[in-house]
Amino acid sequence: MSTHRRIYLDYNATSPILPVVRDAVAEAMDQFGNPSSIHEEGRRMRSRISRARGQVAALVGRSREQVVFTSGGTEANTLGVLGLARLAERRGRLKRIATTAIEHPSLRGAVADLQRQGWTVTTLDDPDASVAAFAVVNHELGTIEPRAFSAELRARGVLVHVDAVQATGKLALAELAADTIAISGHKIGGPQGVGALIVDDAADAALPLVEAGHQERGRRPGTENTLGIVGFGAAAEAVMVPDWVAGWAAVTARGDVLERGLLAIEHVRIHDADRGRVGGTINAGFAGARGESIVIALDLAGIAASTGAACTSGSLEPSPVLLALGLPPDQALEAVRFSLGRGTTDADIAAVLDILPAIVKRARQHA
Amino acid sequence: MSTHRRIYLDYNATSPILPVVRDAVAEAMDQFGNPSSIHEEGRRMRSRISRARGQVAALVGRSREQVVFTSGGTEANTLGVLGLARLAERRGRLKRIATTAIEHPSLRGAVADLQRQGWTVTTLDDPDASVAAFAVVNHELGTIEPRAFSAELRARGVLVHVDAVQATGKLALAELAADTIAISGHKIGGPQGVGALIVDDAADAALPLVEAGHQERGRRPGTENTLGIVGFGAAAEAVMVPDWVAGWAAVTARGDVLERGLLAIEHVRIHDADRGRVGGTINAGFAGARGESIVIALDLAGIAASTGAACTSGSLEPSPVLLALGLPPDQALEAVRFSLGRGTTDADIAAVLDILPAIVKRARQHA
């Protein structure tokens, strides 16, 4: 294992906890109380959660009543998709859900669950869909789905769920045209295991999926993950500094440097480079090398990257996202995802570009 | 508000975070990584979760593979009940679930969900039930359900889910006769928002409820609540000191002192006092006074107690648990739950018994 400072280029998997988040969580641990309790201990915790709710609401430009805290982006995607489907059924709409072939496993899983319940899965162009569910920023490619900002689907009466987990802190979420929006704490420097579903008035009525306690106004039961929520709130506030979204331009610029450097290596593809991308996510294919071999060699050299979604890592299967782009399986297995964050420096990029040609060469020899 | 040290007698709602838990969580915040990632950052987090899994497994006397981390006791109850019901359906068994009328809202909610799916809800004596779901220790009364330790239900082929949230650290969970067991971190000094479902081999196959990421061996998807899990593990280890369960006897003894003191006040009932109880939970009825008035007056005097489950507090309805015992609604509204923990002292009990008669007298005058 390398002894120099590690370089982390896997921000789409998770991000380092921000110092303000660490402080907020540490301070919250000095108190306790069930936020539902009416006594002083309970009120104190309730007020902390209320503050965090305001911080997260501001991040997405919605009202605090629209924030439903969940155990992460996965649960938020499940609640949003299944909740909107229930709403469509109540309204007597056709059981047709429109989605894409490049979604995150959690969104695909919720759609597959509906399929088992008799729903037809279709594309975003289907004029008869009652629900649409898709990510605004793809987790493997960084590509932007413009329909997330378009009023067209909702104008047709389609209920729209947007997975904004990979867009948070990168795009202006207030401009999303959606009935429900999934976001996650740990992609923006907050703790893992906490997220939120943003719901509008109509979607509100479709929750909870299973009745239990009255928490989150009855929409998502269970004693709150108070430490996680406090940390998520602190992270949301930190990324809401006025120039935060504009500040992503600097990350995009570093990503562009990396991308140009990658293309300077022989026989390297950038996957889906012709679509609009959020910047900072580069999915590269190294012809004749296994992506996994490169990721392992990079790790030994002190650099963290990945072959695709962390939620499917360890899998020997090619990425379903890349297969959906039309790549043959052997090419899909050549992929490495580099994802940058605010902590990424020019020196990080230079170091990666310095070491990568030799690593790729060895990986090709061993393939 | 009182200025002296507060006295906390609401341990069944939540418990103070243990110092070892605070230290473990603080230390875990200095590192980061997605536990699913194959690089060093990921492996480090995976190893922390693995350690916590072993700590929780030891607490329940099961193997680590049987531990499925959840976002708390509520989700564990939902997963257990709905998972076992799915398993029963796959086996072609009758859609009959046996339960009691005194369960926690999260267990009642899961049962109600099955009822909407066409299941019949019946009692623990029903010879045709395929699934049984109940708590071993009741959250409002502290009463013990002996069938949780009996092989009888399972011998009849019934799949058994036991809610052990209020039993953890008080009874030997290794002796439970159950296919799935729900436990929670924050009742034993861990963080809120983390729990576990313990599953045996058969129940294992019924999860996940909705497919998504591969976390928790595919049984419960979503990036792990690493801070919560690390804290839960530390709490589990802390309550596993050899004399922990035996040590509960001291809490029971303090509860008995409180109970005798309560009975010395005129017209006080102890609810369900004739059933076997775990000790430390005393549900008292103050004839002619509103329980809520007493709880508020106690809070102003620096003492935290509750009228019932935190998950339903704020509700103006009488406790469904007490109504199920046969209490008329006006008597059910006279209830106050005192729940003790390891941190409760003799002085706490003496102080409560000192102030309570005057508070009860005033509450009766104002009723």
Image (cartoon, coloured by chain):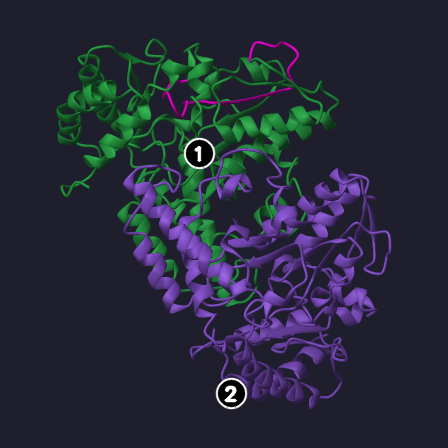
Chain colours: A purple, B green
Instruction: Determine the CA span between mark 1 and mark 2.
Output: 50 Å
Q: Is residue B143 magenta?
A: yes
Residue B335 % position (x, y): 33, 20
Residue for badge 1: B311
| The residue positioned farthest toward the right in the image shown | A127
| Position of residue B338 in the picture relative to residue B178 (left or right) | left
Residue B177 % position (x, y): 50, 22
Q: Chain of mark 1?
A: B
Amino acid at circle 2: Asp
Residue depth check, mark 1 versus mark 2: number of the one nearer the observer? 1
On-image quarter of the C terminus of chain B: top left
- Disc 1 to disc 2: CB gap under 8 Å: no
Determine if marks 1 and 2 fall on one subunit: no
| The residue positioned farthest toward the bottom in the image shown | A264
| Stretch of the chain drawn in magenta | B124-144
Judge by depth and name the residue closer to the eye, B34 or B118: B118
Residue for badge 2: A346
